[in-house]
Image (tube, rainbow, N blue to C red):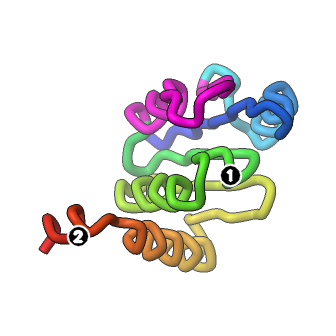
């Protein structure tokens, strides 16, 4: 059974959590299936809501976010999260820019992001993969 999940995070100076929750609900995400984080302080602070979402999501599920940037604190982290979801057969929908990996265009964008994530692999990780 396909489950639609949402993720929202509040970052100081970058938007309110309530606004994102409203957008996700308007997009049809059950409020009981929205994972959240309130990020403040250190950039290396663990994001329990995102980790819980990634653990909970199964192949065939749909993850909805208000903006792609909510999936990470850097381009590399966002690209890695998109790559992980794609590799696991989980559809990603981004409300802000219309990205939907269930469409052919969305899959191409996800593939590019996956390639970018692979470029960010450090030398030691790259050697281990060989």
Q: Is residue 67 left or right of residue 90?
A: right
Judging depth in this view, the residue of 68 and 62 nearest the camera is 68
| 95 in relation to 112, above or below | above
| Closer to the eye: label 1 or 2 | 2
Q: Quote the CA–CA distance across marks 1 and 2.
A: 26 Å
* Image spot of residue 115 (x, y percent): 43, 76
**Residue for point 59% across, 29% down:** 42
| 103 in relation to 7, above or below | below
Q: Which residues are magenta?
A: 33-56
Q: Quadrant of the N terminus?
A: top left
Residue corresponding to mark 2: 126
**Residue for point 55% across, 47% down:** 62
Q: For residue 37: magenta?
A: yes
Q: Are marks 1 and 2 in contact (CB under 8 Å)?
A: no
> Which of the numbered marks, if any, corresponds to residue 69?
1
Q: Is residue 83 left or right of residue 127?
A: right
Q: For residue 121: magenta?
A: no
Which of disc 2 and disc 1 is earlier in sequence? 1
| 124 in relation to 21, above or below | below
* Image spot of residue 95 (x, y percent): 77, 53
Q: Secondary structure at mark 1?
A: helix
* Image spot of residue 113 (x, y percent): 52, 70
């Amino acid at each position: 059974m396909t489950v639609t999940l949402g993720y929202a995070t509040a970052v100081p100076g970058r938007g309110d959590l309530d606004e994102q929750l409203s957008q996700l609900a308007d997009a049809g995400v059950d409020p009981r299936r929205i994972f959240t984080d309130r990020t403040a302080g250190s950039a290396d602070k663990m994001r329990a809501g995102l980790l819980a979402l990634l653990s909970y999501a199964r192949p065939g599920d749909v993850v909805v976010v208000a903006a792609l940037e909510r999936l990470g604190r850097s381009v590399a982290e966002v690209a890695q999260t998109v790559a992980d979801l794609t590799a696991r057969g989980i559809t990603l929908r981004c409300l802000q820019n219309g990205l939907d990996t269930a469409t052919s265009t969305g899959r191409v964008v996800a593939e590019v992001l996956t390639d970018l994530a692979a470029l960010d692999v450090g030398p030691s990780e790259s050697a281990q993969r060989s």
